[in-house]
Image (cartoon, helix red, strand yellow):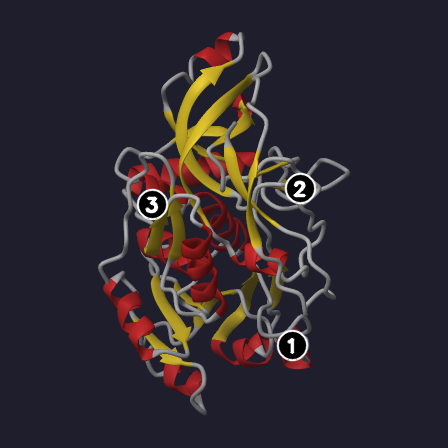
Amino acid sequence: MPSAIAIKQVPGKPGQVYYPLEKITIPDPQPGDNQVVVSLTAAALNHRDLFIRQHLYPGTTFGVPLLADGCGVVTSTGSSPEAKKWQNKRVVLNPGTGWKDSSEGPENPKGYAIMGGTKFNPAGTLADVVLMDVEELEEAPSHLSDAEAAALPLTGLTAWRATITKSQNAKSGHSVLITGIGGGVALMALSFAVAQGCNVYVTSGDQAKIDKAKALGAKGGVIYKEHGWDKTLQGQLPKDRPYLDAIIDGAGGDVVKVGSKLLKAGGVISIYGMTVSPKMDFLMNAVLRNIEVRGSTMGSRKEFAEMIQFVKEKKIKPVVSRSVHGLDIEAINGLFDDMAGFKQFGKLVVTLGSGKGGESKL
């Protein structure tokens, strides 16, 4: 029987509990006509997985394999011609279902069902195998290792929608600020914006992370903990365009208050997360300057295909901070510790089977 890692139920209130990991067995998947079985070679963590262990994520449940990011090889298929064409191909998995191509949001009235650890989707990628509908597959970019390919789906999709679809300012010569550099989404947003010819700036609480971002193409950066960091950043902007066109933000907090001083009139703040605070003030100054705040979460199946194609064309590589091998609970707990302590620069990956690592050398 195939194995997987899930969370084990123990007493505790949401936000105070930290569910332990346990190895479980899962049924041998039997593909329907238009389904395939993927033998996973790598899976990657996201911050939502830490929230699930703390029971701070909607639909948290037990007995469902964790993680939504995965790469693997199709080892068996259903009977349809569409399914059979995927046999033996290396693939990456669309991390959720229920959102086909609408620019506004998921078409499914039940919403977007992300893989891994919740009652909304029975699949997860921290497992030996996973059953997938063929509509949710893309061929893995050939220039990526298994670890890099597994690091791509969820953060790549989230960054693509926030940076390309929602900001509408990822254009050559435009200046874009990406906050909280070091996380997977922020780093993918950096890669996409640099590939589009943007002048990219970053914030971090760690100068070493800013220096690593510069090595990846950022023009500059500031430590947000320092007083007056916004004025410091303004001094780094091009003389002929002394303002930001867009901010790609995963923190929330005072981003509107500070951002409205830095953005052009009509500039956009594209927010994909609020790790600093679940609330923010929308100030009159932002109204007077026509600043737009746009929420952005994940993305459609259409955007996922567009993102993968862009990665292939531009030979973009996700940054892998650290990887461990196998369904080893102690080693995987170490990755969660890295995430909880904000130690990572890039994605945290578990390689599986014959999956290859891919740690960042930055």
Task: Give 167 or 207, whichever is nearer the viewer.
Answer: 207
Is residue 23 something one can see in this rendering? yes
Residue picked out by circle 3 = 148
Tell us which disc is closer to us: 3 or 1: 3
Q: How crowded is mark 3: few (under 14 residues within 10 Å), some or many (20 or more)?
A: many
Name the residue type under label 1: Leu
Residue picked out by circle 2 = 112
| Mark 1 element type | helix
| Mark 2 element type | loop
Q: Residue at x 66, y 35 (%)?
A: 98
Is residue 170 something one can see in this rendering? no
Going from N to C along the chain, the mark reached first, 2 or 3, is 2
Q: Residue at x 37, y 85 (%)?
A: 232
Q: How crowded is mark 2: few (under 14 residues within 10 Å), some or many (20 or more)?
A: many
Name the residue type under label 2: Tyr
Task: Give 114 or 338, whichever is nearer the viewer.
Answer: 338
Q: In 3D space, how far apart are the residues under numbered discs 2 and 3 (Cα atoms)? A: 25 Å
Tell us which disc is closer to us: 1 or 2: 2
Going from N to C along the chain, the mark reached first, 3 or 1, is 3
- Direction from residue 169 to residue 30 in the image, left or right: right
Residue picked out by circle 1 = 288
With respect to residue 202, does 228 lie above or below?
Answer: below
- Direction from residue 41 to residue 133 in the image, left or right: right
